[in-house]
Image: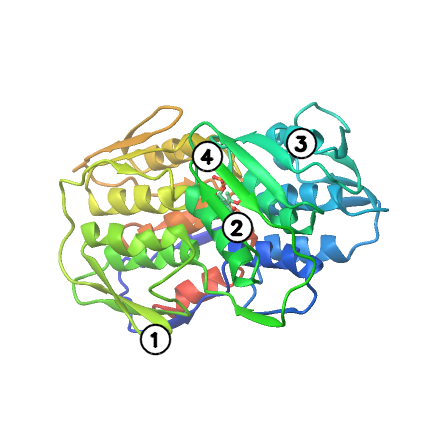
Amino acid sequence: MDLFLDYTDKQIIESNIRISGSKSESNRLLILQQFYPNLRLENISDSDDSVHLTNALQSNKKVINIGHAGTAMRFLTAFFAVSKDKEVVLTGSERMQNRPIKILVDALKMLGADIQYVDKEGYPPLKIKGKEITNHKVSINGNVSSQYISALVLIAPSLEYGLEIELLEKITSRPYLEMTLNLLNQLGIETSWEKNIIKIKPQKTILDKTIIVESDWSSASYFYSLVALSEIGKTLTLSSYNKKSLQGDSCLAYIYQNFGVVTQYQENSITLTKVNSANADLETLNLINAPDIAQTIAVTCFGLGIPCDLTGLHTLKIKETDRLVALLNELEKFGANVEISDRSLHLKTSTAKMNKNVIVKTYNDHRMAMAFAPLALKIPFTIENADVVTKSYVRFWEDLDYCFLK
Ligand SMILES: O=C(O)C1=C[C@@H](OP(=O)(O)O)[C@@H](O)[C@H](O)C1
Ligand SMILES: C=C(OP(=O)(O)O)C(=O)O
């Protein structure tokens, strides 16, 4: 479905948007629930990725396809490796078959797991024969994807002797790893992280526990952008969010102050208000801890006509698409002046008018569609394959429309 967007003669009205639960928290908790069935979950994500994971966990099929869902691929690789008497081929979309997984597979093999590559060495599909794992020490490179480490952490308390993980290199996307450890702690599982060593104690059962998943902060980013591109005084409320979040992308509240947006925290919601114009002298933003909001920020800056220098982006090349190249291609269509390296994006100010009749390609990447959408406040354009958004945010287009409804 291609979608023509034009909000140039519209204004956002004060509305309250309820966003579904965090995809990252949900996918961790769904795995943990397999080990601890008395864990109850509320506000779980209804994203395609979480549905893929739920279906995979309930499946008796020999071949399990998790589509584009990166965390599902990584977490299930570890989960099936310790699922005794189970043998599966775990695969995904064509893109997933080109997203590297060797670092995780090597670590699991170091622990004694039985995993083979079906086609290309280092990439899904994987043939996994579940078995009991008793080794309890492993080292892993942390600078390619934190998801590999989270995958090990999630199975760790189910292992007889727990797990000691030595982290090599600089950790990328660190808040996601902290989130994983924090969720274990909420279940009463003991963990420690000192210098480059993570330790997780074994634990067979937990006390009855209900966790209410906070709504997804990466999804909130598109509304931050919408408010940033609106007139002063415009406001939107999003729920359910907390000031103390497990999600690293909650740094949006801080970052978007640069774009004139202030965040007020209520008990269960946040209100975003455009209070002043953007800071045109934005310093370099290092997004190594929050890679998923890079696209949103780049498009916001372009819409505001301010330059930006985004760094710490080396993981963007192995996400749903090469997001750096995708951003360059699509921003340039509007007339932006963009430079990328393999880890950064530099947007130069352009006072030139934005080009009309652009068709934004989405490259099977939900965040390309959602990051560009708020730009329709400035210029009409078309988004190709707009339904890609369901990977993380099923109701995105309805919720966006709702912001303009009278
Ligand atoms: O653990 C998680 O839930 C995630 C970790 C991040 O990936 P990397 O660690 O690969 O950067 C992030 O980009 C992804 O959307 C979700
Ligand atoms: C990178 C993402 O997801 P994943 O790696 O889980 O596919 C994302 O949602 O932006």
Label 4 secondary element:
loop
Q: Earlier in the sequence, mark 4 or mark 2?
A: 2
Question: Mark 1: which secondary structure?
Answer: loop
Disc 3 marks a residue whose amino acid type is Val
Viewer-proximal residue, 232 or 6? 232
Disc 3 packing (10 Å; few <14; some 14–19; many ≥20): many
Task: Tell whether circle 2 marks a residue whose Cβ is less than 8 angstroms from ligand 1.
Answer: no
Residue 141: % across, % down: 52, 29
Which residue, given by chain and number where applicable, does mark 3 sit on? 105
Q: Amino acid at mark 2?
A: Thr
Q: Residue at x 76, y 32 (%)?
A: 115
| Residue 191 image label | 2
Of the residues tagged 1 and 2, which is closer to the observer?
A: 2
Please tell me whether mark 2 sits on a helix, a strand or a loop. strand
Q: Earlier in the sequence, mark 2 or mark 3?
A: 3
Nearer the camera: disc 2 or disc 3: 2
Q: Amino acid at mark 1?
A: Glu
Q: Which residue is mark 1?
A: 267
Question: What residue is drawn where x is 72% and y is 47%?
Answer: 160
